[in-house]
Image: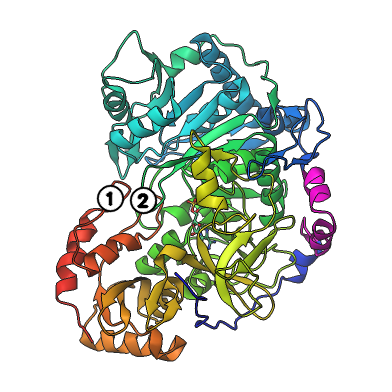
Amino acid sequence: MSGAIENLFHEDRQFPPSDDFRRAANAREEIYARAEADRLGFWAEEARKLVWRTPFQTILDDSDAPFYRWFTDGTLNVTESCLDRHLETHSAKIAFHWEGEPGDTRTLTYQELHDEVCRFANGLRSIGVGKGDTVAIYMGMVPEIVVAMLACARIGAAHSVVFGGFSADALRERIADATCTTVVTCDGAWRRGKVVPLKENVDAAIDGESPVERVVVVRRTENEVEWSDARDHWYHEVVADQPATCEAEEMGAEDLLYILYTSGSTGKPKGIAHSQGGYLTGVASTFRNVFDHRDEDIYWCTADCGWVTGHSYIVYGPLANRATSVIYEGTPDHPGQDRFWEVVARYGVTILYTAPTAIRTFMKWGTAHPARHDLSSLRLLGSVGEPINPEAWMWYHEHIGGSRCPIVDTWWQTETGAIMISPLPGVTTLKPGSATRPYPGIDAVIVDEEGNEVPPGGGGFLAVRSPWPSMLRTIHGDPERYREVYWSRFDGMYFPGDGCKSDEDGDFWLLGRVDDVMLVSGHNISTTEVESALVDHHAVAEAAVVGRTDPRTGQAIAAFVTLKGETRGDDGLIDELRGHVATKIGPIAKPASIVFTADLPKTRSGKIMRRLLRDISEQRQLGDVTTLANAEIVEAIRSGAASSSED
Ligand code: 7RM
C-alpha cells in the first residue's frame, strides 16, 4: 500500500460517560496527564502495585533497542501477585465460577485455586519439570487449564498454550519450535455435545521424533485413550498426595513467562515471547482501569485460553486484581442460541468481554434470544479481536447492554500483551466503531508512509513510538525476524500492521490490516469502512470485502454478505446494498459484486480470513487453510460466487 488510506465513513453518534461512572470509576481524567508528564514514572507506579521479591531500581533498559527490558533488576513470581497476596483477607472469595458445556459446574475460591496450583506445581516438579523448561498446554476450557498455566509460572517453567481446536500437525510444529519436553492435555473436550479427542491428537503430534518426554492428562470427557506407561501420567494421580503449598521460584522480571504462537498471514507461526514483570504490570493495570474492575464485579471474558485474550484477561489480569470470573467451556449455541444470556443471568455477570464475530453472530440469530433473559446485572461491555462495525456496536449497546452500559472497544495484539487503545469508561465519550484513545503510558500515533504523524482527520498506519512494559520481547528463536517484522517499517517505532485514522477530536478508528487495504482507481480504501457501510443496512449482519483485479480500476470491490435471521438475498437487495454503500460513504466504495453467504471464512479465533475470499474472487487455488475454522463455507461461497451479480 502506498498513499494515505481514505477517510470515508463518518459516524456522529456519541455517548459520554454517565455521572455514576464518572464519579465512581477507578480511572479519572487526571490519569492521562499524569502518564503524559512522566511515562516511565507512571509505569513504575503501576508495577509497584504488584508483589516483588526484590524491588526494581531500573524502570527501562533501552541500551539494546528494540530488545527493550523493563524492571530488569527486580525479581518476583507472578503467582504471588495472582494468588498468595489475596489469601490473608480474601481466601474465600470466588476466583472462578466454571460451567461445563453439558451443564456441570464448579467453583474455585482463591484458597482452592492457590492450593490446586501448588499441588500441580509440586506434581510437575515430581515428574521432572522445572525452571527453564517449556510446557505445551493443549486443553479445553476446564479449570485445570488455568491451573496448568499458573503451576508452570509457579515453578519457573514457561508455558506455550496451543488452542485445543488446532490439529495434531499444528501442535507438532509448535512443540518442536519451542522444544517442549512436557505436554499437559485432556482426554477430550466437549464441543456441541461431541468429544474432541485431544489426547489422540497429542499422541499423533509426538509420534516419531519429538522433544516430548512426558504427557499429563486431565480426565474430562472419559473417552478411551491410548496409554504409554513410560510417558503418560493422569493429572489426578500427579496431584494426589501433593501438599497444598509450594515454594515459588524467584524469577527475574525479564525471564520468559510464556510463548504464544500467532499464525500471521504467511510463513511459519511466530512464537511471541512475553516476560514476567512488565507483562503482569500491563495486564493488571489495564484490567483495573479499562474494565473499571471493583471487588463485587462478576466478570466474564468469553475467549479461550488458547488466545492471548485468555492469557491476559482470563488468567493474569483478573487474578492480579482479585476478580471473580466466569468461565464457560462450550460454544454459544449449545444447547440453544441463548446459552450466553443464560450464563449472564445465572451468575449475575456485571462485565462482559467478547468479540465482534460473536456479536455479529448474535445479530444474525435475532434479538429474541437475549430478550428472554434478565441481563440487568450487566454494567460494562467490552469488545476485542476485530474492528467493531458501528451497527454491531449499537446492537450490542441496545440488546445486550440495555442502552445503559458503556462499551470499551479494546485494540491490542498478541504482541502487545495488553490493551493499547481503548476508552476508559469513566472518562471517555464513546463513539460506535472507535477504540478512541491510547491507554495512559502508551505512545501510539498514526503515521504516513514516511513515518510522519498524520494530522487529525487523516488515515495511515498505526505505530507506537515508545516501548511499553507488556510488549513482546522477541520472536522465540528468531530475534532477526522480530526486528524485521515489527521494527523495520518505521525508524525507531513499533509497527503493528494495522491501518488507522483519527477524527477531529483525535480519536482513533482502526481500519483493519494494511495487507487487506484495497486500491481502487488510485484510492486506498479500507475493508473496515466498506464493511461497516454494508452492516449499516438493516438486513445485513456481517460483511467482508476484498479487492479483486480489475482491468479498469486496478482493483474492484468484491463483497460477501451474511443477512440477519431468515432474510433472503436477491438481485433487488444487491442493488439496494450497492446504493446504500454509495450514499453512506461514496460511489468510489460501491462493491462491484455482492455474494450472499450463510457464513464467512474465519480463523479459529473468529477473525474474517479475507485472503481466502481474495483467492475465491480471483478464481485462484486457495492458499494455506490450516488455520481456517469453517472449511465447508469456502466451497459454498465458491459455487455462489460464480452466479453473483456483476457490474
Ligand atoms: C487481542 C487480539 C491482533 C489483531 C490486531 C487487529 C485486530 C484486535 C481490535 C482489532 C480493531 C479492535 N490479538 N484487532 N482488536 N482491530 N479493533 N478492538 O485480537 O493477535 O489475535 O490479533 O486483531 O488487526 O492487529 S491478536
Q: Secondary structure at mark 1?
A: loop
Which residues fall within the magenta stretch?
Answer: 24-46
Q: Which mark is residue 468?
A: none
Q: Secondary structure at mark 2?
A: loop
At 26% from the left edge and 19% from the top edge, which residue is drawn?
A: 208
In the image, residue 289 lies in the stretch drawn in magenta: no
At 35% from the left edge and 90% from the top edge, which residue is drawn?
A: 579
- List x then y, in percent, for residue 93: 68, 35
- List x then y, in percent, for residue 349: 58, 52
- List x then y, in percent, for residue 613: 28, 65
Would you say the magenta stretch is mainly helix, strand or loop? Answer: helix
In the image, residue 45 lies in the stretch drawn in magenta: yes
Are the residues at dot 1 and dot 2 in contact (C-beta closer than 8 Å)? yes
At 54% from the left edge and 83% from the top edge, which residue is drawn?
A: 10
Q: What's under tag 1, amino acid-wise?
A: Asp
The image quadrant where one finds the C terminus is bottom left
Which residue is denoted by mark 1 in the rendering? 624
Q: What's under tag 2, amino acid-wise?
A: Thr
On screen, residue 351 above or below 97: below
Dot 1 or dot 2, earlier in sequence: 2
Residue 561 shows in the view: no
At 77% from the left edge and 70% from the top edge, which residue is drawn?
A: 19
Dot 1 beta carbon under 8 Å from ligand 1: no
Observer-nearest residue: 99 or 263? 263
